[in-house]
Amino acid sequence: AGHFTVDYAAALPTMMYPFLVVSLGLSYADVGVAAGTFTLANSLIQPLFGYVGDRFGHRHVAAFGIVMQAAFIGSLAFVWNSTSLIVLLAFAGIFTGMFHPVGAAVANRAARTLKGASVGTFFIGGTLGFAISPLIAAKIFEEFGLGYATFMIIPALAVGFAVLKFAS
């Protein structure tokens, strides 16, 4: 559920870019820099948060990452220029990167046996989040606008709490 939620939210900016190009007058280069910033922040920070999780507890770090990533993704509905978009995506990327190594560690530890199957199921959750997000977001954004992105924090709060409470 945690990986589904994080990757569902991580796919939302991609669906937001066409609207932001129009509303903010962004260039394709602006969108490319923003998307690249998100991906770099997400990728480069993971070893650090893997270490933090090893030291202070995986489930606490995972739960915090879920909630904070969703908060920053939700705040993208209120960007006012390319700089604010890049800054918010950098923070969203950092918290996305916070979740992934510790989430995988939680999935590994949750299985006493069949660890490969457990971690494989963890990855399915993320892939389903990436697959389903554009289907839902396209329709919602088209009908209701980007303000929908602010609602991402609601399920993330529930999932973050569940990870904190029930993850081993």
Image: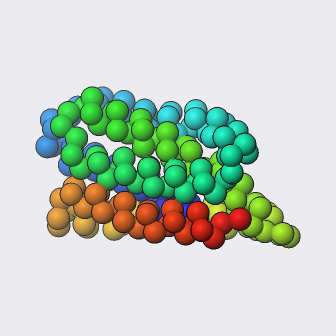
Residue at screen point 70% across, 59% down: 106
Q: Is residue 122 left or right of residue 41?
A: right
Residue at screen point 41% across, 35% down: 90
- 34 vs 76, nearest the viewer: 76
Across and down, in percent, residue 153 comes to 37, 60
Q: Is residue 25 left or right of residue 109?
A: left
- 158 vs 100, nearest the viewer: 158
Q: Is residue 129 visible?
A: no
Quarter placement of the C terminus: bottom right
- 20 vs 60, nearest the viewer: 60
Q: Is residue 111 left or right of residue 104?
A: right
- Colouring method of the image: rainbow
Please tell me in which quadrant of the rendered image residue 25 appears: top left
Across and down, in percent, residue 111 comes to 78, 68
Residue at screen point 55% across, 69% down: 162
Across and down, in percent, residue 131 comes to 46, 63
Quarter placement of the N terminus: bottom right
Across and down, in percent, residue 116 comes to 79, 63
Q: Is residue 80 left or right of residue 30?
A: left
Q: Is residue 117 visible?
A: yes
Q: How many marks?
A: 0
Residue at screen point 40% across, 63% down: 133
User: Which residue appears farthest toward the right when viewing the image?
Assistant: 113
